[in-house]
Image: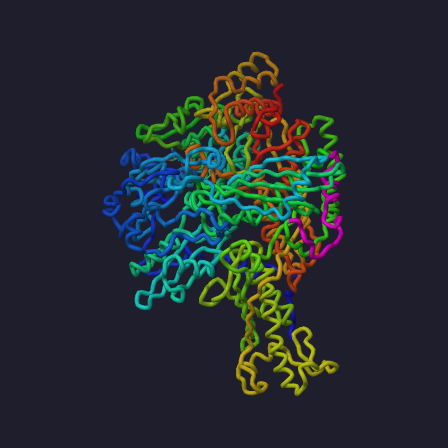
């Protein structure tokens, strides 16, 4: 629980952070809220020798609505999402999901950019962004690019982000239809054993902790598109997934939970 | 006349809290001295391995590293005179292989220390630990009680068995056999008490500060037992006891896990003494989870014989108890502390108990909140529910039919276990709990949900516990082969200016002794509790004491305080009489003032006599100056608190999720000194017991590796997981001490695991579920609802 030695640099801007990433390469890591990275460093599962602190870039904390789109700065904290009037009106799903992350102290430190970059299949917000069909904006040495959430997650704690890229913004569509988030865990502060996010009345459904990345429940989505009843479509929620096994659940139980929670989520989202 | 305030019975805020809440208090980790060296422990990563070689050269070359010692080197340095102590050899022939602070040839559990690094900083020590290279010769690990009992593998290769002892308590074997001959109802049940990881808010830590010229050593330790530690360190290291001073600064909880004599304590003291430099260490949470002792760890078998009406004829119980790899201070005694309680609150004519203690290659077990009694209460309270089912009556009715003295008030009842229960009045306590719980309404709601298939099943569980506290009459401990007494020491002195200083032998680690002792003084001496200061937790200030565990502080230590105060009053009375030129027999003492009976106008307050005793200008002939008295109180009997806990759970039929939605506790801990402290102890204790029922378990794989040694996977519940508890009380004074107090530190834990599990099983009864292992995880519950094994 004692991290290995590291150097600490404070980034003045996103561009500066990217410069520092380029300079220090593999050995360096961005530090946002620190609520995933620091625990890993304490267990010495991560041993970066340079930390580049982007958590102080307060001009990257914003939630703006621009027509049909909501843009959120990467350093926006979960707590800001939870208490956002903009989201209350235009994207209540994201607001609600943020309110279920960890406990209040986690929500006051963790950032949306950090949780997206961390790419944990068990995290809540990445799955919500995925269900919403959101976009990740990344800045690198060669400028800025946009990555669809559906293309973003590439493996166990892995994304398509290059080592010298930083997430600067996340975009989600505004005013989509019925929504629900079903998070099943044993204590309020825990990650989901299984979670299901439903956006836009059922056209976007994603699963938390059902594989190595946040996943779309594609079989259910297409069954619904094909006119299947929600209760029947929900039974396909786990199709194509390979759920992890741990102390909380085996694959059989996770499969059951994915189906049951999808049925609940679809009902709450008004899909029939 | 001065004002008396904050006496016995006042629900006042704790004196300790402002300092704790503002961070003014110092814990071990906050205390620093010049030139201190940090220890870093190299710990075995296997559950059972011979140590082939240890290469320390890489670590020694690291920056800031002072030295690295292997177990073999330390043994050769002859730093200790004896292995780590076990003070409770429960039988004459108990196996107790030596447990050295650092393993010498073989390590026997994951986390056992194999080498120690000394470095200038904590970070340098941690870095160097990673560069100590240990070559192991791996051995088969004994990773469970069942494996210890049934397999040929040995936890200690040099022993030919894993069974450390067999202990039994069968007062009347013939009566027991007769009771189990063809009983109308025969309950046979097996329960598992999973291992639990104590998780005090403050981890353990030590700082040993030597005085190279004087030979004295001061050990700061996050311990519950500075007095016991002092004796044990002297015995273990051979250092002269009078040169040792142990200080337990603010200690952030212990729950039993801080009542041991640990390798780090011995290492810090002996290395500081050898090197002439201060040596310190603070455990990480990973170390706490795997190296500090754990709780529970028992396989229980219990049988009840009853007649056709459910009246109990006999109870017999057998335990296979997991000692872990070594006997720590009271490891083997923990199951015995529970042995007397397998008859619960019931009138049981015939009783038998036996226990086999087994070595495993797991972290040693020892006392954990309740120590043996939560396990006992769980077994009898689960079993009596099963009996109710067999008889076809409700859980309340089966209890009423079996209560000691029919539930009516009793004093000094001799139980079949041979203990004398001080006092009890069980039926009104149950009535009150069921009334607060609205038991009849709950049952109606449960029936409604069962019929309508509402999706969420309701479960109602109760536990009517009794426990043993006020540890302990020294003779009783001697009878159980325990290596110390059970008395407690107190000093009360009136300072010249009339303020009161109390020296407490029992050592708080979060309970609120300063407040409670002040309240006792306020009532006894008629002074304001603000005028009282309580000194404790430093063997130089408080040389005599036996510390805090087993819900003993008030029923033994608090009584000693009260008795010492009485002695001060007696002496003060002689001075007052001298001043009044009256006979002491003619004086009365009311609200702190002495006056001649019948002439209350002329009086002197006890606080005004402090100065007279100090100047000693005009004391009665032959009287020693000063107002200071001390008492060592050895209680004549234990105290037996009891209570009724009712848990209400809701089970989601789809997910298997269990939610504790209501909790009612009506406890009887005798006279209450500070009801607010009692309430706090109950709240914490209840959640700790509910945690065993629903969340906590230390899981090991087949090779003895801990698989959840972090707070991410070892689920300690928070306030968010528990309902707003409804607590109330009955008061049945103890006959074991003059204050009539019993104890409340462990009661919550002793009542709650059984209440919650009885509720879970009750909720699942429509699915044919008759029992479930703890913790009742959603997966386990869901599988049980599918009719599958858990
Ligand atoms: C007790 C606890 C409970 C928690 N419970 C939950 C939960 O229930 N649900 C849940 O979803 N999460 C939970 N979390 C995780 C929490 O939400 C984290 O804060 C979040 O996942 C990471 O965000 P962060 O800002 O703290 O990132 P950091 O920890 O600072 O960084 C995480 C990783 O992302 C990288 N990174 C950070 N920002 C960027 C960026 N802008 N561009 C590129 N890379 C970046 C870092 O280099 C690092 O590798 C919990 C955490 C804790 C400690």
State the residue at coordinates (35%, 57%).
B81
The answer, for residue B246, to whether it is visible in the render is yes
Residue furthest to the front? B174
Query: Magenta residues, as a range?
Result: B391-416
Rendered-image quarter of ligand 1: top left
Residue B411 lies in the magenta-colored region: yes
The quadrant of the image that shows the C terminus of chain A is top right
Residue B737 in the image: above or below residue B606: above
Q: Position of residue B43 (x, y in %)?
A: 36, 43
For residue B15, what is the image quadrant? bottom right
Residue A54 in sight from this viewpoint: no
Looking at this view, is A193 or B598 the one in front?
A: B598
In which quadrant of the rendered view does residue B555 lie? bottom right
| Residue B306 picture location, percent across and down | 71, 39
User: Residue A118 placed where, x, y %?
Assistant: 41, 32
A170 lies above or below B295: above
Identify whether A262 is placed above or below B240: above
Quadrant in which the N terminus of chain A is drawn: top left
In the rendered image, residue B665 lying in the magenta stretch gets the answer no
Is residue B315 depicted above or below B549 in this figure? above
Count of numbered badges drawn on the protein: 0
Q: Position of residue A53 (x, y in %)?
A: 36, 41
Which is nearer the eye, B390 or A245?
Answer: B390
* Near-viewer residue (A216 or B659): B659
Query: Which residue: 45% across, 52% down?
Result: B86
Q: How is the image coloured?
A: rainbow
Q: Nearer the viewer, residue B48 or B274?
A: B48
Residue B393 horizontal side relative to residue B88, left or right: right
């Amino acid at each position: 629980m004692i991290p290995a030695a590291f150097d600490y640099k404070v980034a003045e801007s996103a561009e500066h952070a990217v410069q520092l990433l380029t300079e220090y390469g593999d050995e360096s890591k961005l530090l946002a809220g620190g609520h995933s990275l620091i625990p890993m460093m304490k267990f010495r599962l991560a041993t970066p020798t340079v930390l580049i602190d982007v958590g102080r870039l307060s001009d990257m904390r914003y939630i703006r609505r621009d027509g049909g789109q909501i843009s959120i700065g990467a350093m926006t904290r979960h707590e800001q999402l939870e208490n956002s009037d903009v989201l209350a009106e235009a994207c209540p799903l994201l607001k609600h999901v943020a309110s279920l992350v960890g406990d209040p102290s986690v929500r006051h430190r963790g950032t949306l950019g950090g949780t997206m970059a961390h790419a944990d299949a068990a995290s809540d917000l990445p799955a919500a962004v995925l269900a919403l069909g959101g976009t990740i904006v990344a800045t690198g040495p060669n400028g800025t690019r946009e990555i669809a959430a559906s293309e973003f997650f590439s493996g166990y704690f892995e994304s398509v982000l290059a080592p010298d890229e930083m997430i600067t913004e996340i975009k989600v569509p505004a005013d989509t239809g019925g929504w629900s988030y079903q998070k099943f865990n044993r204590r309020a502060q825990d990650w989901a054993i299984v979670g299901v996010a439903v956006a836009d009345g059922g056209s976007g459904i994603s699963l938390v902790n059902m594989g190595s990345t946040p996943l779309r429940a594609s079989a259910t989505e297409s069954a619904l598109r094909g006119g299947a009843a929600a209760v029947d479509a929900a039974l396909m929620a786990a199709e194509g997934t390979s759920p992890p096994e741990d102390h909380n659940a085996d694959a059989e139980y996770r499969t059951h939970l994915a189906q049951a929670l999808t049925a609940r989520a679809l009902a709450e989202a008004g899909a029939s | 006349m001065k004002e008396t305030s904050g006496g016995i019975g006042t629900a006042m805020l704790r004196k300790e809290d402002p300092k704790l809440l503002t961070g003014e208090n110092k814990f071990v980790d906050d205390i620093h001295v010049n030139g201190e060296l940090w220890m870093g422990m190299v710990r075995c990563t296997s559950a059972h391995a011979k140590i082939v070689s240890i290469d320390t050269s890489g670590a020694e070359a690291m920056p800031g590293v002072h030295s690295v010692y292997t177990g073999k080197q330390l043994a050769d340095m002859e730093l200790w005179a004896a292995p780590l102590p076990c003070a409770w050899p429960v039988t004459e022939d108990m196996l107790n292989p030596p447990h050295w602070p650092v393993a010498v040839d073989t390590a026997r559990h994951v986390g056992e220390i194999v080498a120690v690094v000394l470095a200038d900083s904590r970070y340098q020590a941690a870095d160097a630990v990673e560069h100590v290279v240990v070559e192991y010769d791996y051995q088969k690990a004994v990773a469970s009680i069942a494996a210890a009992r049934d397999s040929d593998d040995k936890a200690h290769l040099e022993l030919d068995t894993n069974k450390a002892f067999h202990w039994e308590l069968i007062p009347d074997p013939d009566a027991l056999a007769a009771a189990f001959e063809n009983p109308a109802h025969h309950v046979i049940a097996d329960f598992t008490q999973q291992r639990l990881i104590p998780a005090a808010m403050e981890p353990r830590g030590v700082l040993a500060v030597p005085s190279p010229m004087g030979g004295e050593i001061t050990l700061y330790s996050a311990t519950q037992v500075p007095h016991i530690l002092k004796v044990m360190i002297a015995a273990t290291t051979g250092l002269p006891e009078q040169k040792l001073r142990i200080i337990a600064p603010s200690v952030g909880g212990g729950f039993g896990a801080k009542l041991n004599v640990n390798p780090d304590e011995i290492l810090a003291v002996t290395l500081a003494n050898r090197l002439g430099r201060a040596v310190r260490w603070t455990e990480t949470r990973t170390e706490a989870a795997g190296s500090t002792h754990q709780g529970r760890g028992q396989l229980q078998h219990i049988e009840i014989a009853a007649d056709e009406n459910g009246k109990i004829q006999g109870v017999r119980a057998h335990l296979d108890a997991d000692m872990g790899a070594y006997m720590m201070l009271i490891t083997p005694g923990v199951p015995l502390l529970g042995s007397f309680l397998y008859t619960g609150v019931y009138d049981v004519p015939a009783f038998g108990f036996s226990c086999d203690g087994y070595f495993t290659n797991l972290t040693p077990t020892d006392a954990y909140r309740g120590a043996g009694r939560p396990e006992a209460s769980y077994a009898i309270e689960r079993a009596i529910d099963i009996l109710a089912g067999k008889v076809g009556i409700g859980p309340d009715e089966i209890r009423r039919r079996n209560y000691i003295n029919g539930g009516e008030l009793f004093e000094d009842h001799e139980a079949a276990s041979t203990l004398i229960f001080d006092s009890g009045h069980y039926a009104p306590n149950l009535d009150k709990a069921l009334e607060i719980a609205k038991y009849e309404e709950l049952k109606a709601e449960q029936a409604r949900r069962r019929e309508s298939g509402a999706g969420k099943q309701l479960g109602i569980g109760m536990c009517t516990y009794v426990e043993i506290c006020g540890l302990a009459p020294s003779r009783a401990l001697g009878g159980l082969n325990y290596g110390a007494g059970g008395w407690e020491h107190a000093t009360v002195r009136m300072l010249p200016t009339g303020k009161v200083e109390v020296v407490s032998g029992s050592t708080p680690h979060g309970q609120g002794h300063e407040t409670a002792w002040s309240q006792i003084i306020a009532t006894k001496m008629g002074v304001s509790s603000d005028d009282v200061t309580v000194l404790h937790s430093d063997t130089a200030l408080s040389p005599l004491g036996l510390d805090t565990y087993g819900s003993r502080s008030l029923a033994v230590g608090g009584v000693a305080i009260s008795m010492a105060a009485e002695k001060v009053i007696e002496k003060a009375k002689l001075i007052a009489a001298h001043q009044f030129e009256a006979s002491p027999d003619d004086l009365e003492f009311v609200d702190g003032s002495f006056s001649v009976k019948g002439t209350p106008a002329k009086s002197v307050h006890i606080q005004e006599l402090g100065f007279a005793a100090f100047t000693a200008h005009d004391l009665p002939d032959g009287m020693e100056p000063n107002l200071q008295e001390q008492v060592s109180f050895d209680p004549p009997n234990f105290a037996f608190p009891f209570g009724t806990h009712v848990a209400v759970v809701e089970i989601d039929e789809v997910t298997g999720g269990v939610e504790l939605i209501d909790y009612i506790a009506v406890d009887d801990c005798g006279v209450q000194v500070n009801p607010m402290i009692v309430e706090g102890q109950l709240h914490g204790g209840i959640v700790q017991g509910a945690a065993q029922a629903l969340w906590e378990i230390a899981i090991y794989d087949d090779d003895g590796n801990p698989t959840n040694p972090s707070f991410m996977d070892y689920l300690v519940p928070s306030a968010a997981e528990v309902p707003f508890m409804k607590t109330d009380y009955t008061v049945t004074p103890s006959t074991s001490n003059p204050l009539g107090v019993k104890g409340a530190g462990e009661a919550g834990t002793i009542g709650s695991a059984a209440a919650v599990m009885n509720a879970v099983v009750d909720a699942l009864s429509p699915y044919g579920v008759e029992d479930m292992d703890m913790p009742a995880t959603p997966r386990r519950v869901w599988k049980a609802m599918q009719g599958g094994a858990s």
